[in-house]
Amino acid sequence: EGTVLYEYSNGDEDVHVRFTIEDAAKNDIEKVLDLPVENRGNYLVPLRDVVHVKKVTSPTSVFRQDLKRASLIDADLKKGAKQSPIEVAEYFEQHVFPEILTKYPSTTLSFAGEVQDTRESRTDLRNAVIMAVFLIYVILAVLFNSLVKPLIIMLAIPFGTVGIILAFWLHGKLLFGFFAAVGALGLSGVVINDAIIMLVKLQTEYENKPKQGSQNKLIASVVQTRLRAIMLTTITTVAGIVPTAYGFAGYDAMLAEMMLVLVWGMVFGTTLTLVLIPCVYAVVEDIKLKYLRKTND
């Protein structure tokens, strides 16, 4: 850019007089060194005769992070690469970085960009899952006034997660994106709806009915009355989500992945709810009955 020698005012405008060279000589260091300059004897000589030039590799600017000089290296995966950025980062941290740190112990090496964002998202998501499960349990424990029944209802969550994994595998999706994880977190609150409907009906009718005949038959008769309500609830919800999941009216990669999680998580979770919840409820009631008999004896 040259050097500003002086400036003067031309009306309301400041004019800078800059000392520089012609643009054609700026593209090649050899052209710069061939420029004629005046020496002490008032003769014009090539610039290379009066200066010493050493070629080195250095950053174009000094970048600091946390008050320390730092250098950023940009990298990306080749198209069709089978490894994720996290896997590449873990390989470098385990096999490459230790050797560099041994040679240069004062150096600090770390990943930023997608790797850092993904790791932070994992931590945030893990905390969100723990908080969501805890709050769901507390709310259910207060509503049902029981410590065991919320656990029966929440069994639908892991089985809904199994449905997500199978669905993604069948769709050829082997990597879960962040929006899929958010969808799975939302699914934990949706998939237990059917379990609540089932357990409320069992609590209302089974516990108030006289215990005559087989306990399992009595539970099965109560469950049959909720079959239509549960199926309709799931079918209507899934029907509203499927167009977005498969892009029938326009495809969005982020929303489609999230909706796919909700669709198959609900389908799989509801199917198991119709069988799993009554079975677990029957086991719990059987244990309670045996305990009461043992206490009375």
Image (cartoon, rainbow, N blue to C red):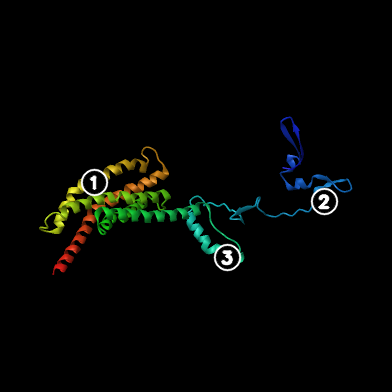
Report the amino acid beneath label 1.
Met
The residue most toward the left is: 212
The residue most toward the bottom is: 297
Report the amino acid beneath label 2.
Asp
Q: Which mark is residue 231?
A: 1
How crowded pointer 1 is (Cα within 10 Å; few <14, some 14-19, many 20+) is rated as some
How crowded pointer 3 is (Cα within 10 Å; few <14, some 14-19, many 20+) is rated as few
Q: Secondary structure at mark 3?
A: helix
Q: CA distance from mark 1 to mark 3?
A: 59 Å
- Image quarter where the N terminus lies is top right
- List the residue tagged with mark 3: 99
Q: Is residue 237 visible?
A: yes
How crowded pointer 2 is (Cα within 10 Å; few <14, some 14-19, many 20+) is rated as few
Report the amino acid beneath label 3.
Glu
Q: CA distance from mark 2 to mark 1?
A: 90 Å
Q: Quadrant of residue 25?
A: top right
Q: Which mark is residue 49?
A: 2
Q: Secondary structure at mark 2?
A: helix
Residue at screen point 76% across, 46% down: 32
Residue 208 as seen in the image, left or right of residue 137: left
Residue at screen point 14% across, 67% down: 296
Rendering coords of residue 47 (x, y %): 80, 48
Rendering coords of residue 226 (x, y %): 20, 48
Residue at screen point 74% across, 48% down: 29
The residue most toward the top is: 11
Rendering coords of residue 197 (x, y %): 23, 49
Quick one: 240 or 5, which is closer to the camera? 5
Q: Quadrant of residue 277?
A: bottom left
